Image: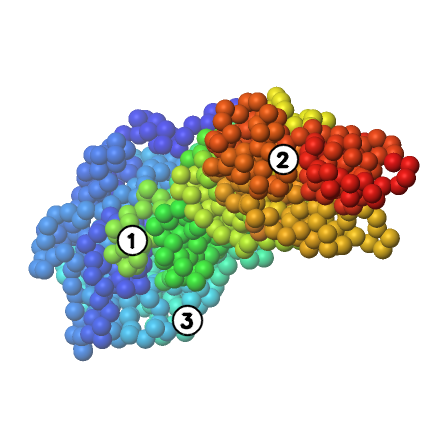
C-alpha cells in the first residue's frame, strides 16, 4: 500500500539520493508580456512597471520569461548554465533565498546567454540587451525560482524560474523580445544515465521570443498569448512488442498520437482568436548559427553554433545536413487550432518550437514556446492518468469509474472560473451543474489502469499531481488526497486549490491558466517494463480563471428586508428624543423627523413580559466578500431592567427563515446575520415609578479586509480603500410597561394623583380641584389620561386638557389633567364615584402579531377610582351660650352641654319683663361659611316646650292667636310675625362673624316689655351659608343638627325688673300699680332700701335674681271669670288685664291659666262699679 508522503518530502528524498550536480540544461522556455498600464506587476521584480507610461510616444510593457532547467547530472561542463544550482536549490528549500543564478558567460561567445530585444528602425535592425549597455556585461542573470518539482518523466527534478524585464516601446513599432543562448540538452549517451538526450538540435543554442506591438488604440491587445505547455510531452511507443507483459497497441499504417497545445490569450477579449503553427528553422534559432544572411546576419560570433545545423519540425529554407530522426519530424503536423499529430512508432526525444499568434487582433503578436516531445516504451502501462470532471464516484463515464467526490467542473478560456480579487469564492463557469460558487477548486485525476489484469499484478494509483505552470502568489494547494469511496476508487486522487487574489498585487489580476500534470505508479512483476506516464497535453489539464479587479466603485453591503427592520442611514440620529436634558433635541427638531439628518432615531418597543428580538442581516453583491456585523447596544441604567445582548454572527442564513434555526455556513461569509435580544420576559413591572431611558442600538455591515491585504498599497493602486462598509443604522429600544398613576407618596410630588379610593368633599360654591397624574416607563412616551365612561362624572365636573411636565428627579414626562368640581344645590347630599385610566397608545407596527396583541394589553393601566361627596351644610349649634341640652327642661342651660359638647337646636327660658337678657348663638357646618339671622316668618317649635309652641299663619276660620290678624298675641314677636308685632324697642341681634374655627356667632339682647308678661314668645334663628343661603343647608332636624335654632321665652307673671335708678315709688307710678310702694317693699323683703333699687343690668348672667315681685299668681279654676277673680283679689278687671297682657278680654281666660293678681288694688267706687256688672248669681 502506498504511503502518503508530502510532495516536498519526495523532492527532499530525491535530492538525498541524487545530489545536484553543477549542471542545468535548458528544457523549456516561453515569453509573455502585458502592458504596465493594464496592470502588469511582478512582486519578485518590483522595479518593473513602477511607473505607467501610456502616452503617444512611449508605452511601457512588462515582459516575463518562464523557463525550466534540469537539475540532474550529465552534459558537458563547458556549456553549464547553472553552476551554482546546488546552492540555489538548497537556499530555496531552506527558504533562505529564491534566486536562481544563471550564468551569462558573456565573455565566452560560444556559450553565452542573453536577454534582449530586436527591432527594425527604418532599415536598420537594432539589437538591445536588457541590463547591459555594452557587451560584455556581468556574469549573472538573477532569475527567481517559482518551484522545484519532478520532471514529467518522473526521473529527475526540474527547477522552474522566471525573469522579468521592462520594455519601453514606441506605439506602432514591432519588437521581438528574446531569450537565447547555450544550450539545449545533449545527444543521448550511455555514460549519462537518465539524462534527456534529444534526437534533433542536441547541444544547440535555444531561442524563445515574443513579438510585441503596442498601440494607443484600445481595440488592440494589452497583453500576449501565454503558453502553458509541460516542459515535456510524454507519448507512448505503439507498434512494437517491447519487453513488458502487456501487449502493445497494434500500430496501423500510420502510428500517430494527437494532442492539443495548451495556450491561451491573457487578454480575455481575444480568447477565441488564438492560432498555432510550427516555428520555422530561423524562429527555432537557426539564424543564430547561419552567417551571411545579409540584413538578417545576426551572428555575433560563429563559434556559438556547432557545425551541425539546427532543424525545425518543418524545415523551411534551412541549409546544412540533418540528423537521424528527421523522418519522424517531417511526418508530424499541427493545425491552426493547435492539434499536434505526432508519430509514435519508435522511442526518442525531440525538441519542438511552436508559434502562437493572434488572428484579427491588429498585430500578429507571435509568441514561441520551446519544449520537448518524448516517445517512450511503457508497455506495462497502457494508459496515462487523465483529469476527471465526474463528481459521482459510483457512476462510470466511458466505461470507467472515474468519479471523484466534489471534483470541480471543467473550464475553458472562453468560459473560465471568475474570482473577484480579495475574495475566496470561485464562480463556476456558466452551464455547469452543481453550486454556483466554490470555496475551493478540486482537481482530480484518474488512471484507467486501476484494476489487476493478466499483465498487471496490482492496480495503479496516482503518485503525484503538480502544476506545470508557475502559480501566482497566494495560491495554496493541498497534499494529495485519494478517493476512497465508489465502485472502483483505486487510481483516483485529487488536490484542492484555494486562493484569495490580492487586488493590490496586479500580478494576481487578469486571466490565468493553472495547468497540472499527474504521474501514475504501480508495483509490477519482475521483468515488467513499467514506466510512469503523465497525462497527454490538453486544455482539460488547465483550470482557467479570470480574476477581476475591484470595481471602480465598490458597492457596500445591502441590508436584507426582511428580516432587518430599518435600513436607512441614521448614525447621527438622536437617541434621546423626548428625554430630559436631551443634548440633540434641538437638532432633531430641526431635522423634521429625518434620522439621517440627526432626527430622532427609529424607535421600536420592548414589551415587558417578552423578549424583544431584532434580527439584522446583510449581503454583499460580491459573493467573495467577507462581511462582519458590528453591533453596539447601550447598557440599561435602571435596576431590574436588563441590557440587550448581541448574538454571535452566523453566515448564509435564509432571510425568510428564523435565525435560531439557521446553521452558519462559513462558505457564505458574504451573507451575515446576528440578533439583538432585549429579554424583558422576567421583568414583571418596573419596581419604581421612574422612567427607563431608551437604549440605542446601532449596526453596520462591514466588508472585512484580510490581514494579508496591504491597504496602503491598495489605496496607491486604486485611489480608494479596499472596503466599503454600509452606513450605520441606529434605532432606540423603548420599554413598554403598563402606564401608571403617579402617587404623591411614591413620587413626593404635591400635584401627583390621589391614592385609590380617596374621597373628596365638594361643597356648594367651593369647587374642589385635584390632579390625575400618570406616566410611562418609556421616557419619551406621553400617556393619555381618560375618564372611564361608567360611572362617568357628575355634571359640573371639568377635566382640563393634559399638561406634559418633565420631572427630572424621576426621569419622567408626566401627563397631568386637573379635575375641578363645584356641585349645584341639587347635587348636594350625593356621592359620586369617578374612575380614570392611563393609556399608552404607542404601537410598533414592525412587531409580531403576539407583540402587537401584548402591546394593546400593556397600553392600559389599572383604573384609578376616587369618590366625590357633595354634602349639604349640616348645622350644629354647639357653642351657643347658654347651651340647651334637655328638651324637657323649662330653663335654658339647666345642665350645660352634653358630654359631647353638643347643644340642641331648641329650648326655652323663663324670663322677667324689664330684665335685659343677652345670649350668644354659635352655628357651624363643616366646609361651609355660615351667618346667623333671625327667622322672620311664622314657625313652630314642637320641642321648645313640652306642649310645643308655634306662631301659626292666620287662615280662614282661624281661632286663637295667629299671625296676620293684626294683633301681636300668643307666641308672636317682631321676629316670628313682624306684620302683627312692631319691632321691640329694646331687642337687637348682632352678627359677630366667624371665629378661627369657622363657627358663626351672633349676639342677641332683649328686654321684654311689661305687656309680654305671661306670654311664651317664640324666636327662631336660621344658620345660612353665605353663598348658597338656606338652600344648601340640610333640612333635617334632630337633637344635634338643625338648620334653625328656636327659643321659647316664657315671660313670668307678677315680676319685672326696674330700670336703673328707679325707686319703689317711681316703679309704682311707672307701672300704675295702684298700690303703695310700701306694699311692694313688703312683697320684696330682699330689698335693702325702697329708694335704691338694684340695677338688673348689672347681673347679666342672672337678671331674674333682681326682679321685683308685684303680687301672687292665681290659677284659673272652672267657673272663674275676670270679674269673679277681680272681686276675689279686691282688684279690678282693668288691673287684671294690665298685669296679664296675654288675656285678651274677659271671655278669653282658660281654666288652668296663670294670672298675676295685684291684691287690694281696687277702690270702693271702682269695686262697686265692676261688681254691679256681675250677674246676680255672683
Coordinates of residue 227 in the picture (x, y in percent): 38, 56
Coordinates of residue 93 in the picture (x, y in percent): 28, 33
| Residue 177 image-quadrant placement | bottom left
Q: Is residue 850 left or right of residue 497?
A: right
Pointer 2: residues within 10 angstroms few (<14), some, or many (20+)? some
Disc marking residue 1075: 2
- Secondary-structure class at tag 2: loop
Outermost residue toward the right in this view: 1177
Pointer 3: residues within 10 angstroms few (<14), some, or many (20+)? some
Q: Are discs 3 and 2 less than 8 Å apart at CB?
A: no
Of mark 3 and mark 1, the one earlier in the sequence is: 3
Disc marking residue 359: 3
Coordinates of residue 1175 in the picture (x, y in percent): 88, 41
In front: label 3 or label 2: 2
Of mark 3 and mark 2, the one earlier in the sequence is: 3
Disc marking residue 714: 1
Q: Residue at horizontal 62%, vertical 22%?
A: 895
Please state which of residues 640 and 427 is positioned toward the viewer in this rendering.
Answer: 640
Disc marking residue 1038: none
Marks 3/1: CA–CA distance: 36 Å
Q: Residue at horizontal 64%, vertical 49%?
A: 974
- Secondary-structure class at tag 1: helix
Please state which of residues 244 and 570 is positioned toward the viewer in this rendering.
Answer: 570
Please state which of residues 974 and 1075 is positioned toward the viewer in this rendering.
Answer: 1075
Outermost residue toward the bottom in this view: 122
Amino acid at each position: 500500500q502506498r504511503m502518503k508522503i508530502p510532495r516536498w518530502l519526495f523532492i527532499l528524498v530525491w535530492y538525498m539520493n541524487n545530489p545536484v550536480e553543477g549542471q542545468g540544461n535548458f528544457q523549456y522556455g516561453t515569453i509573455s508580456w502585458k502592458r504596465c498600464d493594464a496592470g502588469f506587476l511582478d512582486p519578485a521584480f518590483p522595479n518593473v512597471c513602477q511607473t505607467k507610461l501610456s502616452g503617444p510616444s512611449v508605452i511601457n510593457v512588462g515582459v516575463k520569461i518562464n523557463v525550466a532547467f534540469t537539475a540532474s547530472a550529465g552534459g558537458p561542463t563547458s556549456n553549464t548554465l547553472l553552476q551554482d544550482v546546488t546552492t540555489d536549490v538548497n537556499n530555496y528549500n531552506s527558504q533562505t533565498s529564491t534566486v536562481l543564478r544563471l550564468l551569462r558567460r558573456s565573455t565566452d561567445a560560444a556559450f553565452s546567454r542573453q536577454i534582449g530585444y530586436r527591432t527594425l528602425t527604418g532599415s536598420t535592425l537594432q539589437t538591445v540587451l536588457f541590463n547591459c549597455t555594452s557587451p560584455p556585461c556581468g556574469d549573472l542573470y538573477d532569475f527567481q525560482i517559482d518551484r522545484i518539482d519532478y520532471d514529467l518523466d518522473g526521473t529527475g527534478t526540474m527547477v522552474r524560474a522566471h525573469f522579468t524585464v521592462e520594455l519601453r516601446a514606441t506605439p506602432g513599432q514591432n519588437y521581438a523580445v528574446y531569450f537565447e543562448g547555450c544550450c539545449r540538452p545533449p545527444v543521448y549517451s550511455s555514460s549519462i544515465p537518465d539524462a534527456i538526450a534529444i534526437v534533433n538540435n542536441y547541444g544547440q543554442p535555444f531561442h524563445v521570443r515574443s513579438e510585441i506591438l503596442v498601440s494607443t488604440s484600445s481595440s488592440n491587445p494589452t497583453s500576449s498569448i501565454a503558453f502553458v505547455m509541460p516542459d515535456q510531452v510524454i507519448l507512448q511507443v505503439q507498434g512494437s512488442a517491447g519487453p513488458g507483459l502487456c501487449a502493445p497497441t497494434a500500430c496501423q499504417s500510420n502510428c500517430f498520437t494527437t494532442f492539443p497545445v495548451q495556450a491561451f490569450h491573457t487578454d480575455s477579449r481575444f480568447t477565441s482568436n488564438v492560432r498555432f503553427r510550427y516555428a520555422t528553422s530561423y524562429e527555432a534559432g537557426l539564424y543564430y548559427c547561419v552567417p551571411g544572411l545579409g540584413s538578417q546576419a545576426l551572428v555575433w560570433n560563429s563559434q556559438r553554433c556547432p557545425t551541425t545545423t539546427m532543424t525545425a519540425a518543418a524545415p523551411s529554407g534551412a541549409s546544412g545536413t540533418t540528423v537521424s530522426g528527421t523522418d519522424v519530424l517531417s511526418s508530424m503536423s499541427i493545425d491552426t487550432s493547435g492539434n499536434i499529430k505526432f508519430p509514435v512508432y519508435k522511442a526518442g526525444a525531440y525538441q519542438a518550437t511552436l508559434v502562437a499568434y493572434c488572428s484579427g487582433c491588429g498585430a500578429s503578436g507571435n509568441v514561441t514556446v520551446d519544449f520537448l516531445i518524448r516517445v517512450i516504451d511503457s508497455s506495462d502501462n497502457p494508459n496515462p492518468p487523465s483529469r476527471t470532471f465526474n463528481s459521482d464516484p459510483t457512476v462510470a463515464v466511458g466505461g470507467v469509474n472515474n468519479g471523484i467526490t466534489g471534483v470541480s467542473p471543467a473550464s475553458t478560456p472562453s468560459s473560465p472560473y471568475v474570482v473577484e480579487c480579495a475574495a475566496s469564492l470561485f464562480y463556476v463557469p456558466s452551464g455547469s451543474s452543481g453550486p454556483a460558487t466554490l470555496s475551493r477548486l478540486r482537481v482530480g485525476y484518474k488512471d484507467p489502469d486501476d484494476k489487476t489484469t493478466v499483465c498487471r499484478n496490482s492496480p495503479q494509483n496516482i503518485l503525484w499531481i503538480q502544476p506545470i505552470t508557475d502559480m501566482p502568489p497566494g495560491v495554496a494547494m493541498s497534499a494529495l488526497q485519494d478517493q476512497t469511496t465508489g465502485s472502483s476508487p483505486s487510481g483516483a486522487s485529487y488536490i484542492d486549490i484555494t486562493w484569495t487574489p490580492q487586488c493590490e498585487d496586479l500580478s494576481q489580476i487578469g486571466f490565468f491558466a493553472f495547468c497540472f500534470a499527474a504521474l501514475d505508479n504501480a508495483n509490477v512483476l519482475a521483468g515488467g517494463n513499467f514506466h510512469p506516464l503523465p497525462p497527454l497535453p490538453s486544455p482539460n489539464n488547465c483550470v482557467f480563471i479570470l480574476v477581476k479587479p475591484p470595481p471602480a466603485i465598490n458597492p457596500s453591503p445591502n441590508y436584507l428586508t426582511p428580516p432587518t427592520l430599518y435600513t436607512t442611514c441614521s448614525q447621527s440620529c438622536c437617541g434621546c428624543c423626548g428625554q430630559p436634558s436631551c443634548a440633540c433635541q434641538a437638532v432633531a427638531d430641526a431635522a423634521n423627523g429625518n434620522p439621517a439628518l440627526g432626527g430622532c432615531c427609529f424607535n421600536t418597543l420592548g414589551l415587558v413580559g417578552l423578549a424583544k428580538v431584532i434580527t439584522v442581516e446583510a449581503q454583499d453583491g460580491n459573493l467573495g466578500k467577507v462581511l462582519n456585523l458590528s453591533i453596539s447596544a447601550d447598557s440599561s441604567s435602571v435596576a431590574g431592567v436588563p441590557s440587550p445582548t448581541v448574538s454571535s454572527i452566523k453566515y448564509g442564513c435564509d432571510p425568510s427563515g428564523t435565525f435560531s434555526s439557521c446553521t452558519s455556513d462559513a462558505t457564505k461569509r458574504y451573507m451575515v446575520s446576528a440578533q439583538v435580544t432585549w429579554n424583558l420576559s422576567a421583568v414583571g413591572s418596573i419596581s419604581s415609578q421612574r422612567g427607563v431611558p431608551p437604549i440605542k442600538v446601532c449596526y453596520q455591515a462591514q466588508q472585512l479586509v484580510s490581514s494579508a491585504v496591504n491597504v496602503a498599497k491598495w489605496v496607491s493602486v486604486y485611489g480608494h480603500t479596499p472596503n466599503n462598509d454600509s452606513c450605520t443604522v441606529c434605532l432606540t429600544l423603548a420599554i413598554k410597561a403598563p402606564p401608571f398613576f403617579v402617587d404623591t407618596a411614591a413620587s413626593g410630588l404635591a400635584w401627583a394623583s390621589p391614592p385609590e379610593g380617596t374621597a373628596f368633599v365638594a361643597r356648594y360654591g367651593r369647587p374642589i380641584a385635584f390632579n390625575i397624574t400618570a406616566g410611562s416607563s418609556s421616557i419619551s412616551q406621553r400617556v393619555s389620561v381618560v375618564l372611564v365612561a361608567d360611572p362617568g362624572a357628575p355634571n359640573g365636573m371639568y377635566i382640563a386638557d393634559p399638561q406634559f411636565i418633565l420631572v427630572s428627579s424621576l426621569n419622567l414626562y408626566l401627563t397631568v389633567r386637573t379635575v375641578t368640581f363645584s356641585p349645584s344645590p341639587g347635587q348636594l347630599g350625593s356621592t359620586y364615584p369617578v374612575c380614570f385610566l392611563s393609556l399608552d397608545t404607542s404601537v410598533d407596527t414592525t412587531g409580531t402579531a403576539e407583540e402587537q396583541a401584548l402591546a394593546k394589553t400593556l397600553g392600559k393601566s389599572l383604573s384609578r377610582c376616587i369618590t366625590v361627596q357633595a354634602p349639604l351644610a349640616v348645622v350644629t349649634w354647639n357653642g351657643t351660650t347658654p347651651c340647651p341640652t334637655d328638651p324637657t327642661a323649662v330653663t335654658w342651660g339647666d345642665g350645660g352641654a352634653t358630654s359631647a359638647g353638643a347643644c340642641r337646636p331648641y329650648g326655652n327660658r323663663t324670663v322677667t319683663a324689664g330684665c335685659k337678657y343677652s345670649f350668644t348663638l354659635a352655628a357651624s357646618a363643616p366646609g361651609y361659611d355660615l351667618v346667623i339671622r333671625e327667622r322672620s316668618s311664622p314657625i313652630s317649635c314642637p320641642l321648645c316646650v313640652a306642649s310645643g309652641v308655634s306662631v301659626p299663619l292666620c287662615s280662614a276660620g282661624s281661632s286663637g292667636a295667629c299671625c296676620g290678624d293684626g294683633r301681636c298675641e300668643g307666641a308672636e314677636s317682631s321676629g316670628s310675625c313682624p306684620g302683627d308685632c312692631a319691632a321691640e324697642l329694646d331687642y337687637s341681634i348682632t352678627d359677630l362673624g366667624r371665629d378661627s374655627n369657622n363657627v358663626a356667632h351672633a349676639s342677641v339682647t332683649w328686654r321684654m316689655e311689661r305687656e309680654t308678661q305671661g306670654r311664651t314668645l317664640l324666636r327662631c334663628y336660621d344658620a345660612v351659608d353665605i353663598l348658597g343661603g338656606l338652600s344648601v343647608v340640610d333640612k333635617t332636624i334632630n337633637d344635634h343638627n338643625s338648620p334653625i335654632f328656636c327659643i321659647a321665652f316664657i315671660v313670668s307673671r307678677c315680676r319685672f325688673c326696674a330700670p336703673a335708678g328707679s325707686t319703689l315709688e317711681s316703679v309704682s307710678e311707672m307701672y300704675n300699680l295702684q298700690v303703695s310702694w310700701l306694699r311692694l317693699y313688703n312683697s320684696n323683703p330682699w330689698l335693702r332700701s325702697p329708694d335704691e333699687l338694684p340695677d338688673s343690668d348689672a347681673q347679666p348672667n342672672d337678671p331674674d335674681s333682681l326682679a321685683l315681685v308685684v303680687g301672687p299668681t292665681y290659677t284659673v279654676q272652672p267657673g272663674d271669670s275676670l270679674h269673679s277673680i277681680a272681686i276675689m283679689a279686691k282688684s279690678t278687671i282693668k288691673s287684671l288685664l294690665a298685669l296679664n297682657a296675654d288675656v285678651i278680654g274677659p271671655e278669653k281666660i282658660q281654666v288652668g291659666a296663670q294670672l298675676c293678681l295685684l291684691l287690694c288694688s281696687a277702690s270702693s267706687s271702682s269695686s262697686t262699679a265692676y261688681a254691679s256688672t256681675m250677674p246676680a248669681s255672683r
